[in-house]
Image (tube, rainbow, N blue to C red):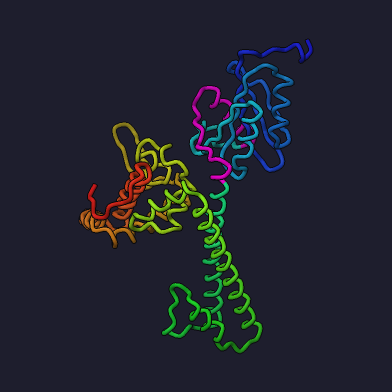
């Protein structure tokens, strides 16, 4: 029988995709069994052609893991009439054999299997415009990381040369006076002096890049009335400055997708990891699963918030009576997150000193 006479109408095909830069490893399941494994070019169009040629008339469901490839493939698959979801790799059920023997084909087979039995839940997919502002916010963070590395290189060089900066120059924020003092430092060997000059030049270049990105983010907020309103609400919360506010917005986008505080806390990484065995249950601290752009940022914000909000300061003081300050600030961070969620979802500015 020719393929043109095949008809898979009413049948569901489940396709697991293990995404790579140069290829996709594909596993197809039909009627509860694996029917095909193959590798192809990383192209939604190629996958669409293959499915419609070999399984015409079927309903196609695909899945791949979130990672370097972003959301573009999801959008193209959906436009081609294929039902696709993207999953968090940590949320994919894995058998012990699959953990011991990890290969691309095993990964795609696992995804197809779990998709076919309904064990997978897709992550939130932002719009293209929301994704673009997220990339700009994350770029700023990358530049800040580069800045820290550059500072550490300079410190390492000074230690290597046995040099110290005058005590009357503030080092903490690396002010212009501090950098000027570094440039004026007497170093006998010209090559070492040139090394320091290059490192300082690179540091100032990174600082200019950070300033440019922040300016672009402010312009974006100013030009978008909806985003401007959200940022203004977030800025009413103690501990939340512009960078924290725009990062919150770019990573969350729609606060109403989290129906409960616990869902939002889990997304950010404020939920504890628990190990349960029989009747015993042990809390292991914060879960390793987190949004790396938000958790530490909110913890840092909480230290500022308790200095400016008496209600949070009071709560922090009570917590410190029964736990270490580092553990107490995690509890405060969750309280701060609750305030952020309330202000954002109810479109109401924050009221200082309200105890909830």
Please give left or right for residue 77 compared with residue 262 in the image. Answer: right
Choose between 114 and 292: the one closer to the eye: 292
The residue shown at (47%, 48%) is: 225
Q: Residue 300's spot in the image, x, y percent? A: 38, 58
Q: Quadrant of residue 280?
A: top left
Residue drawn at x 52%, y 75% is 155
What count of labels does the image hold? Answer: 0
Q: Is residue 271 left or right of residue 163?
A: left
The answer to whether one can see residue 145 in this image is no
* Magenta span: 103-131
| x then y, percent, for residue 20 | 66, 41
Comparing 91 with 105, the one in front is 91
Report which quarter residue 128 is drawn in.
top right
Q: Residue at x 41, y 46 (%)?
A: 269
Residue 114, placed above or below residue 350? above
Residue in the image at 58% along x and 65% along y: 209
- From the top left corner, tell me how far across and down residue 145 is, in percent: 53, 62
Report the side of 102 relative to 256 (left or right).
right
- In the rendered image of this protein, does residue 15 appear above or below residue 342? above
Vertical side of 96 occupied by 247: above or below: below
């Amino acid at each position: 029988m020719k393929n043109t006479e095949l008809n898979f109408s009413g049948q569901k095909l489940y396709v697991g995709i293990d995404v790579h830069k140069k290829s996709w490893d594909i596993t197809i399941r039909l009627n509860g069994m694996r029917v095909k494994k193959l590798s192809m070019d990383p192209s939604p169009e190629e996958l669409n052609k293959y499915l419609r040629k070999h399984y015409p008339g079927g309903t196609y469901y695909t899945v791949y893991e979130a990672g370097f490839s972003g959301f573009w493939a999801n959008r193209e698959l959906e436009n081609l009439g294929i039902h696709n979801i993207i999953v968090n790799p940590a949320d994919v059920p894995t058998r012990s054999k699959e953990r011991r023997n990890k290969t691309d084909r095993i990964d795609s087979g696992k995804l197809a299997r779990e998709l076919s039995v309904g064990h997978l839940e897709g992550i939130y997919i932002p719009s293209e415009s929301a994704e673009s502002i997220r990339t700009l916010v994350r770029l700023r963070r990358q530049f800040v990381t580069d800045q820290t590395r550059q500072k550490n290189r300079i410190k390492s060089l000074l230690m290597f040369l046995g040099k110290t900066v005058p005590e009357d120059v503030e080092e903490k924020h690396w002010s212009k006076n501090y950098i000027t003092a570094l440039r004026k430092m007497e170093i006998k060997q010209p090559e070492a002096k040139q090394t320091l000059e290059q490192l300082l030049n690179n540091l100032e270049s990174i600082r200019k890049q950070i300033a440019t990105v922040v300016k672009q983010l402010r312009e974006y907020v100013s030009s978008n009335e909806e985003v401007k309103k959200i940022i203004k609400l977030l800025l009413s919360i103690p501990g939340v400055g512009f960078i924290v506010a725009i990062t919150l917005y770019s990573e969350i986008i729609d606060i109403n997708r989290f129906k409960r505080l616990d869902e939002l806390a889990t997304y950010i990484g404020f939920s504890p990891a628990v190990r349960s065995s029989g009747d015993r249950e042990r809390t292991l601290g914060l879960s390793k699963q987190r949004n790396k752009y938000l958790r530490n940022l909110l913890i840092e914000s909480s230290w500022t918030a308790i200095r400016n909000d008496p209600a949070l300061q009071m709560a922090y003081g009570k917590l410190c009576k029964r736990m270490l300050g580092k553990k107490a600030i995690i509890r405060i961070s969750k309280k701060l997150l609750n305030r952020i969620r309330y202000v954002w979802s109810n479109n109401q500015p924050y009221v200082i000193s309200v105890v909830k």
